[in-house]
Amino acid sequence: MDIICFSHLRWNFVYQRPQHLMSRLAGHFDVYFIEEPIFDASSPYLDDSLNTENVRVIVPHLQEGISWEEVNRQLERLIKDFISSNDIENFIAWYYTPMALSFTQEIKPALVVFDCMDELSAFKDAPQHLKEKEAELLQKADIVFTGGYSLYEAKKSRHQNVHLFPSSIDRHHFEKARQSNIELQDQLEIPFPRIGFSGVIDERMDVDLLNEMALKRPDWNFVMVGPVVKIDPAILPRHSNIHYLGSRPYADLPYYLSGWDVAMMPFSINESTRYISPTKTPEYLAAGKPVVSSAIHDVVRDYGEQGLALIAYSPDEFIECIRSALNMTNKESWLKAVDAKLAQNSWDLTCEKMMFLINTIHETKKNDKLIQKKEDEYV
């Protein structure tokens, strides 16, 4: 089978769960990664390119200013024509965004996968019909994966075949930070100690917490690596000891992490973070960096309770946890515990387990069809 993946994230955005999984699946299947549209065209078309990971990235280009209904009509026609012209017949429809159902009702996949990596309805500027479309997708899906325990708890009663696959890790990539002495230019002149964050800077970031830490600890330097999206950059605290480096390539992340003393996750505790299971947690740990996090439920459950990450419930606690991490005396035994935890999972293993479940369901569906066909012939 081929895989047609419908994603709310662009391939060349921050490297996350969809990229990890689809790049691995592309070693065994033809993978088509369909992004959300860009509104810049005089007439609708698809930009189709094969990337270095053997994934065909499909970007719809539509006219600016058309209605939501017209957007979906044009996307439906473009996708149907693309499937037909590429002779794609036996395929898995793999959804990251339920909104893609608005233009894919007419396609005929052999199997439907819903990989629920986030509670998208809780995010800033969530589409109006998102909850309705998610309910439809849960009805349509043959199998549902969730990106964290909180999401699993929220979805398991809504579908008969839900499986937990929390954030995993490319250990080999991030362990480079443990041996690297490469100092990247834009971080080179930032004084120590450095407390770093990598990832999307959006409504989940506790800007008040970041501001308070910078004011109370002017001797610490806070390094922020990642794009600013969905929030006005003007609301971000600006102090001489906060350094916004912007988006950086996935390949370079270990070299940024190697220059930090502590890795942090200063998230707000609100609806947008209720169900998150940050991929950066195991990435920080694989890099060998002590982790300090706000009290995100899945981080507390999977790492805090096991003593692998320090959890803070207030700005003063966050500062105290960073101070403790900077003065860690048991790093060797802590790293052994970290490595034992990370050895239990990898994106390769996650991909293998997912495909085992998918193949099992596919074989069951084929057998059911054969039985039904024989029964029809008998009648």
Image (cartoon, rainbow, N blue to C red):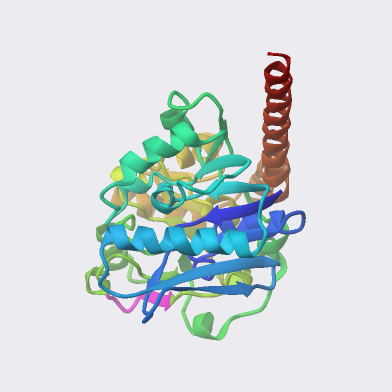
The x and y percentages for residue 43 are: 39, 78
Magenta stretch in the rendered image: 238-245
The answer to whether one can see residue 150 in this image is no
Q: How many marks?
A: 0
Q: Residue furthest top?
A: 379
Q: Tell me residue 81's x, y (percent).
A: 54, 63
Tell me, yes or no, whether the highlighted magenta stretch contains residue 62: no
Image quadrant in which the C terminus is located:
top right
Depth check: give the residue in front, 295 or 19. Answer: 19
Q: Position of residue 343 (x, y in %)?
A: 72, 44
Is residue 311 visible in the rendered image? The answer is yes
Q: Position of residue 308 (x, y in %)?
A: 56, 43
Between residue 281 and residue 209, name the one nearer to us.
Answer: 281
Who is closer to the viewer here, 367 or 15?
Answer: 367
Q: Is residue 182 left or right of residue 268?
A: right
Quadrant for residue 274, please give it: top left
For image coordinates 33% across by 65% down, the residue present is 217
Residue drawn at x 70%, y 24% as measured from the top left = 373
Residue at the image position 44 percent from the left and 58 percent from the top: 76
